[in-house]
Amino acid sequence: MIRMATPRTVNTFAAQPGRVLPYTSVDSSFPLLTHGRLEQGIASRNGDVSTVWEFLASARDLASRLPARRYAINLCRDRYQFLIAFAAALLAQQISLLPNCCAPEALSQLTERYPDAYVLADHNDVPSGMALCRVPDCVQAIDRRADIPAIPSQQVAVIVFTSGSSGVPRPHAKTWGSLVRGAHALKQQFGIGEDGSHVMVGTVPAQHMYGMETTIMLPLQSGWILHAGHPVLPADVAEAVRKTGNAVWLMTTPIHLRAYVGQRTALPGLVGIISATMPLPRSLAAKAEDLWNVPVREIYGCTEGGMVGYRQPTATHMWSLCPGLRMWKEGDHAWVSGGHVGQSFRLADRIAVQSPLQFTLHGPHHDLVKVAGKRTSLAALNAVLAQIEGVVDGTFYRPEWSLNPNARLTAFVVAPGISASTIQAELRKRIDPLFLPRPLHLVDALPRNPIGKLPREWLSAFAMEMTSEHRQRES
């Protein structure tokens, strides 16, 4: 039986009735949010707006009923309910675990690693045997206190996990202070002010570091309204934007953006687009800016440190380092430290430091390909593949060469109505024949995760399945 606990004491910012104080830090603490009035909106669902005081009442009510455990696995699908669960855990001084995969086996491994954990969810789709605390659809907001909780800067707020695109997901703890400073770095770089009329619509899950930064922390620290849903399909995104009735910032990924541009999705009211998780081709950014007449900005970051750099692809191929950060090279590897990142850590990508404030990105270290004395990268090959007309999605794949040194590169391509031979012919014009994929598989879709990445384990399993099917057809 799980024992229930009330939230521990936290600092608060007092305010006059109906007003909350502006952003500041007190005694090494930061406020939970920076909205200016308790009646101000903080979340929108199907056109209905929840206010700040309704949110605070819901978070405090949930915090008073949380199990007395150290870790809360936040699996909420609705973004507003995710926010309520996240805030309740903060008030109870619990650490939110944000897994990037919700498969039963992955959750089982997570609870083995963190035995003092339970699940916070807005649904019942949780493996049997796991302690579950349901986040209610709504709470009667009778608590109209005008104080805003202040969370200690050094309090560990979340543990996020790498995507697994370069191997096994690894955990990284984030303090409340680092999350707040990261949100303010985003605001500074993109000229975002305290504007309560702006709405955030996100196509990425809040459980991912990029989603956490842009769809949870940025609205909290900018006085914005967040869209409670998680639209991905073009029609769903169009509906979400239409129903908000406000100026909208779209937080998305290149793979999602390509689908919206391809279908020429109507998105009236957009004021800005932020993209991340993989390089954004300049051609795609240009099409998006022409279609919606808004700037497209791109974030370079990682789970370990959050946002590291930014650029507008249509203006420059160079990345600008976030203020307060320092980047340097040691051998073939780039390191970064300072600002919201904190202690130094090594970046997984191949980076050329052009100046103290600028750098260029050349893809992950693990994607280097060497054949007969020549070298390239999977990222470079994928960029060429994406430029071929009619290719919707695609990736080159390198088998484990330690197991088979003679294995050739393979490619998996989504290109309805185009033959493999046509794509091969286009590739032959653009890359060295040594790097041509043999074979090239035409597939219906790639095994991407919700943020558009291809975890190595998923892609390896997919490659084995496709290879087996190919051999069966050849035999």
Image: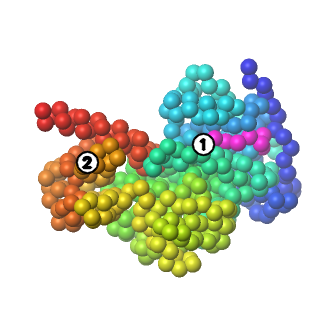
Q: Could you tell whether 93 is left or right of 347 in the image? A: right
Badge 2 local density, few (<14 within 10 Å), some, or many (20+)? Answer: few
Residue that label 2 marks: 407
Residue 226 visible in image: no
User: Residue at position x 22%, y 53% from top?
Assistant: 437
Q: How many C-alpha atoms fall within 10 Å of the one at disc 1: few (<14), some, or many (≥20)? A: many
Q: Is residue 445 left or right of residue 231?
A: left
Q: Relative to 386, does residue 441 appear above or below in the rendering?
A: above
Part of the protein shown in magenta: 91-97
Q: Quadrant of residue 4?
A: top right
> The disc labelled 2 sits on which kind of residue?
Ala
Tell me which numbered mark, 2 or 1, is placed earlier along the sequence.
1
- Mark 1 residue element: strand
State if disc 1 and disc 2 touch (CB < 8 Å).
Answer: no
Instruction: Tell me what residue is drawn at x 53 percent, y 67 percent.
Output: 334
Front residue (pair 30, 108): 108
Give the residue at x 65% y 27%: 132
What amino acid does circle 1 point to?
A: Leu
Label 1 sits on residue: 98
Q: Nearer the viewer, residue 272 or 440?
A: 440
